[in-house]
Structures are given as structure tokens and as C-alpha cells.
Image (cartoon, grey):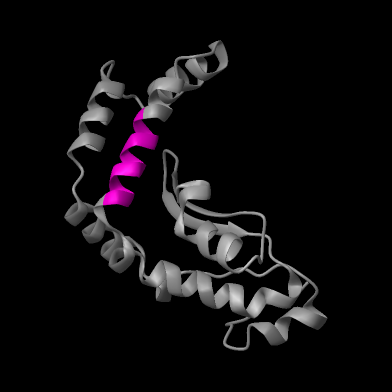
Amino acid sequence: GAGSAGRLFEVLRLQRGYTYGASSAFTSNLETGYFHAASSVQGSSTKESVALFKEIIDHFADDYDQKKLDGVKDSMLRSNASAFETSASLVNMLSRIRNYNLPDDYVAKEEDVVNSMTLNDIKAKAAEYLDIDDMVIVVVGDAATQLKNVPDAKLIKAI
């Protein structure tokens, strides 16, 4: 996660130059939630990029430190503040509160949760939810040139 401050961006963009962007996030709705990570990479770096995604996600908890947690907390709290800056963002926040049947003090409670998160909490959740062996990796591109770049893939029909 964390956009340009995240580890995926740091490695794939800044260190390797494979992409203009890479990110990950947890997404949820009323019924379910999931983790996703994505990037558009040059075809010639597909194999290395897939390997890096797997490595970074698999070692997330090992590489996560207090400085990163503090940065994420700051970003989340600033994001909450910006939810009240425009009419559109306010409507979005109020819609979320209504759609999820959240209490009126949801924003304050969410900020309390964010402020109370510890490094051990994050590492425990990462161990629980970021199991690379349970993830589906989707590679989109020219099958004629890209299938060879993911030799250990469990394939569905290429289209």
C-alpha cells in the first residue's frame, strides 16, 4: 500500500524502473473484502516483476517497521480530514456511513483505532491475511510472449 511511499513502488519503480506505478490495498464492501496489488510493467520485466511482487508481499511483516507505521497512520488521518473538504468528499463519507450502517461517531472511532495500532498488530494481521500461497496472480499481456515469463503459473485458459 501507501502509493508512492509503498515498498512495491519503491522496488518496482525507483530501484528497478519497471513501471510508473505499483500499489496494493485491502478493499472491502458489504459482503466481502480482498487484498490486491497491481502494476503495469514492461513485457520484458514480467518474470522479474511477478517474482518481486511475491517476495515483497511474502516478506511484508519482516520489512515493516515503526517508521512505516507512523507514516501510514499520518496518511490515514490526513485522508480522514480531507473527507470533509469538498461537497463531493463529504457526500462520499456520509454515503459510506449510511451504506455500512456506521455510528454517527464513526470517524472519531476510526481515528482512535488508527492511533492505537501497534507494530505487533500490523505484523499479526499481515501473517493472518497476506499468505502468498493463497493468492491468485493475474498477468495480462500477449500470451505468445508472456506465458514463458511465468513458468510456475497455475494457468486458466489464456484468451
- Residue 40 lies in the magenta-colored region: no
| Magenta region | 67-77
Q: Quadrant of residue 59?
A: bottom left
Residue 98 screen position, x and y as percent:
40, 20
Left or right of 143? Residue 25 is left
Residue pictured at 27% horizontal, 57% vertical: 65
Left or right of 134? Residue 44 is right
Residue that protrudes farthest toward the front in the picture = 15
Residue 55 screen position, x and y as percent:
44, 74
Left or right of 7? Residue 64 is left
Q: Main secondary structure of the magenta part?
A: helix
| Image quadrant occupied by the C terminus | bottom right
* Residue 158 seen in this snapshot: no
Residue pictured at 21% horizontal, 43% vertical: 117
Residue 85 screen position, x and y as percent:
49, 14
Q: Nearer the viewer, residue 71 or 120?
A: 71
Q: Nearer the viewer, residue 152 or 82?
A: 82
Vertical side of 61 occupied by 44: above or below: below
Q: How many marks?
A: 0
Q: Nearer the viewer, residue 137 or 158?
A: 137
* Residue 93 seen in this snapshot: yes
Residue pictured at 73% horizontal, 68% vertical: 42
Residue 89 screen position, x and y as percent:
52, 19
Q: Quadrant of residue 123?
A: bottom left
Vertical side of 124 occupied by 141: above or below: below
Residue that protrudes farthest toward the top in the picture = 87
